[in-house]
Amino acid sequence: MESPLTCLKGVGPALAQKLEKLGLFHVEDLLFLLPLRYEDRTQLVKIGALVAGSRCLVTGEVLLSETVYRGRRNLLVRISDGSGQLTLRFFHFSRQQQAQFHVGTSVTCFGEVRRGSAGFEMIHPEYRILRENQDASTNESLTPIYPATEGVQQGRLRNLTDQALGFMQENPPVELLPASVTNKLGMPSLAEAIRYLHRPPPDANVKQMLQGRHPCQQRLAFEELLAHYLSLRRLRALAETEEAPALTNGDSEVGRFISDLPFELTGAQKRVIDEILSDLAEPHPMMRLIQGDVGSGKTVVAAIACLKAIACGVQAAIMAPTEILAEQHWRNFSEWFRPLGIEPAWLSGSQRAAARRESLQSIADGRAKLVVGTHALFQEGVEFESLGLVIIDEQHRFGVHQRMALRDKGVSARGHPHQLVMTATPIPRTLAMAAYADLDTSVIDELPPGRQPVSTIAVPDTRRGEIVERVRSACASGQQAYWVCPLIEESEVLDYQAAEASYQVLTESLPDLRVGLVHGRMRPAEKERGMRAFKEGLIQLLVATTVIEVGVDVPNASLMIIENAERMGLSQLHQLRGRVGRGAAQSHCVLLYKPPLGRIAKERLAVLRDTNDGFIVAQRDLELRGPGELLGTRQTGLPDYRIANLVRDADLMPQVQITAEAMRTASDKNAAAIVRRWLGDTRKYGKV
C-alpha cells in the first residue's frame, strides 16, 4: 500500500505537511504509528467512586455554570450524576463554549481527576454535550494516544488511523515472515497485530503493552529488526561479490616490525592480527570491526594492517572523528613508520591551504603511502592513487553512508579497498548484531601485562579541598594528573564547573604545580602544544574538557578527577578513566558529583566503582540510556527504529539472525520485500 495521505478524507496539502513531521507520507505509515499509551473510555465511572490521579469517563447533568476571576478568568461547570458532584474547570474558552453548559444539560467528559478547593475537578477535560434523551456512549476499544505534533489533534489522528485500518481490511498486508517463525514465537499475523495495537479490546493487558512486551508489539518489532539486519547482511553479501586486491606479500616486513616493537603483543592482539591478515589475503574486501577496551592496543594492530597494505603496493588511510585523535594517530604512526622510510601524510579541515595542496598532491600521485586525517578524507577533491585499506577509528561517530563514501573513494581497476573499523566503546553482543551485521567482529579482550585496574571512587564536591590536596601530593611524588570539566566557560544555564574557571582556581590553589589547559575551542596547534607539554612532563596537572576522551596516551598520568560526573554517560566516563592506568603505577579516578544524586546517577557511579570491564559498563549504559546514546551522539551510525527497541527487544536478536539467514537462502524475494516495507528508500543505509 503506497497510497498518498491526501487520498484520505479530510487530508489536504496543509495537513499532509504537518503529518510529515511525524514521518507520515503514505497511508501505510499510519498503520505503523503506534500509540504511546491507552485510555479506558469503555466504561462510565460514577462520580462518587472517582479517585484522585485516575483518568476516567463520567457523565452528569449541569447544576451550575459560571465565570469567575481568581487571578485569571475561569469557567467553572458543576455536574452531578446522583452519586456525587464534579467541577469542570476551563482556563481557555469562548463565549460559544460557555453558552453550551446551561443548567440541566447532560454532558459526557474524560480527563484526569484532581483534588480542588471544592472537591474533585477535571481541568480542560475532553467533553461532549448530549442531545435531549441521548444516552452517554462508551467506546468499544481502548482509546489510543498517539505521538503528537503541532496542529494535529488526537481526534484527527484517531480518525485517520480508522481510515487506514479500513484500507488495510480491503488490502491486507502480505505475510512475509515464514509461518514456522510466527508459530514458533506465538506471534499473530501482521494485520491482526496492527489492528489490535491501534484498537485494543477493553480487556487488553495495558501494562504489558506499555512495557512493549505484548505479542502484537513483538510481532512488529521482530519484523523491523529483521528488516534492518537483512539490509546490512545484503551489504555484506554485495561486498563478497566485489573484488579487492589480495594482499599476500609483506610477511617479512610485518614480522620485523613486530619483533622490533619495545613490548610483547598480547595473545588477543596476535589472534586479531591473524584474523585481519587472513582477510587481507582474500580477493574480496575485508569488512571487519575491532572492539577493544581502552588501552587494549588497537592502534598497533591497525599499524600492522597498514604496513601489510603498503608492503603490497597500495595506500592505506586512517580516519578519526576528531582532530586530536587523528593527530595522536599521526604521531604514533610517524614514530613507527619513519624508520621504515614511510612518511604518513596528514589531512584535516583546519589545514592551511598550502599544506593541504601538498597533502592532496602526494595522496593523488601515490607518494603518500599512509594518509591520516579526519572526515576531510572523504570530502570532494580528495583523490587516491591506489587506496587498498581504509581504517576508521571510533566507528560509532560515523554513519554507515560516511564509511561507504570513504570506501567508494578507493574503487579502482583493482577493485574495492579493504575496510577495518575500530571502537574503544565495547558493544554488547545483541547491539553489535543489530548495528554491525555487515561486519565480521574481532575482540581484543586482554590488556597488556602489568596494567593494574584503575581504583575509582565517587566524592561529593563539598570535599573539593581534600581532592585538591590529593592532586598536590600525587604531583609532588612525580606523577601527573588530569582534571576534566564538561564545559569550557561558565554557563548561567548549566551549573557545571567550567574548564577555564577550574584552571584559574587550580592555578591559584596549587602555585607550586605547572598547570595546563586544553579544550575543544583552541586552535589545533595550541591543543597540540598543551598535549605535548603534558606528555613530556612539562605540565603536571592538565585541566581539560572531554576532548581528551580518546587518543591521549600519557603513561605517567595516574590520577584523574572528573567534575560533574553525575551528568555524564557511563561509557564516556569509562573512556575518560581509560586515560589513566597506562603505566606501572597504581592509578586512581575520582568522580566529583554535586549532591543530591538521582537514582540513575547513583546507579551509573556505582557501576564505575564496581568494575573496570568495558563490556559490563557498556551493557549497563545500554540499559540506562539506550543504544543511540551508547554509540555516541545519536548519529547515523545506528538507524532509527520506529517500533523496535534494541534494549527491550534484545532477546529477539538471536532468532532474527537465524530467520534472516534462512530467508536469504530460501526466499530472497521476501527478504527484499521486508526491507522495502520497513526501510523504504534504503540508499541511506548503503546499497541495499
Image (tube, rainbow, N blue to C red):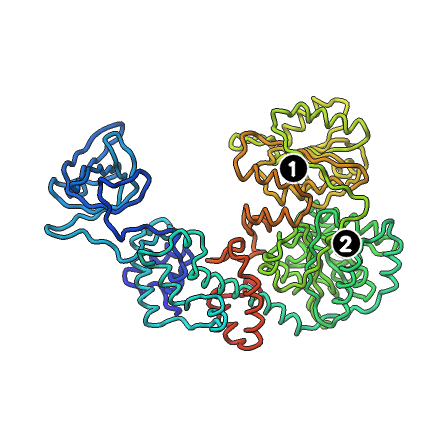
Q: Which residue is mark 1?
A: 545
Q: Is residue 44 above or below residue 412?
A: above
Q: Residue at x 65, y 28 (%)?
A: 502
**Left or right of 244, for residue 11:** left
Query: Element under label 1?
Result: loop
**Mark 2 or 1, closer to the camera:** 1
Quadrant holding the N terminus = bottom left
Q: Is residue 12 above or below residue 236?
A: above
Query: Element under label 2?
Result: strand
- The kind of residue tagged 2 is Ala
Q: Which residue is mark 2?
A: 345
Q: Is residue 418 above or below residue 336?
A: below
Q: Residue lying furthest bottom in this view?
A: 666
Query: Which quadrant of the structure image shows residue 384?
Result: bottom right
Quadrant holding the C terminus = bottom right
Label disc, if present, on residue 253 of the rendered structure: none
Q: CA distance from mark 2 to mark 1?
A: 28 Å
Q: Is residue 352 visible?
A: no
Q: Is residue 334 visible?
A: yes
Percent x, y of residue 258 = 86, 56
**Left or right of 456, for residue 537:** right
Please state which of residues 423 and 119 is positioned toward the viewer in this rendering. Answer: 119
- The kind of residue tagged 1 is Thr
First in sequence: mark 2 or mark 1? 2
Please state which of residues 297 and 188 is positioned toward the viewer in this rendering. Answer: 188
Percent x, y of residue 660 = 56, 69
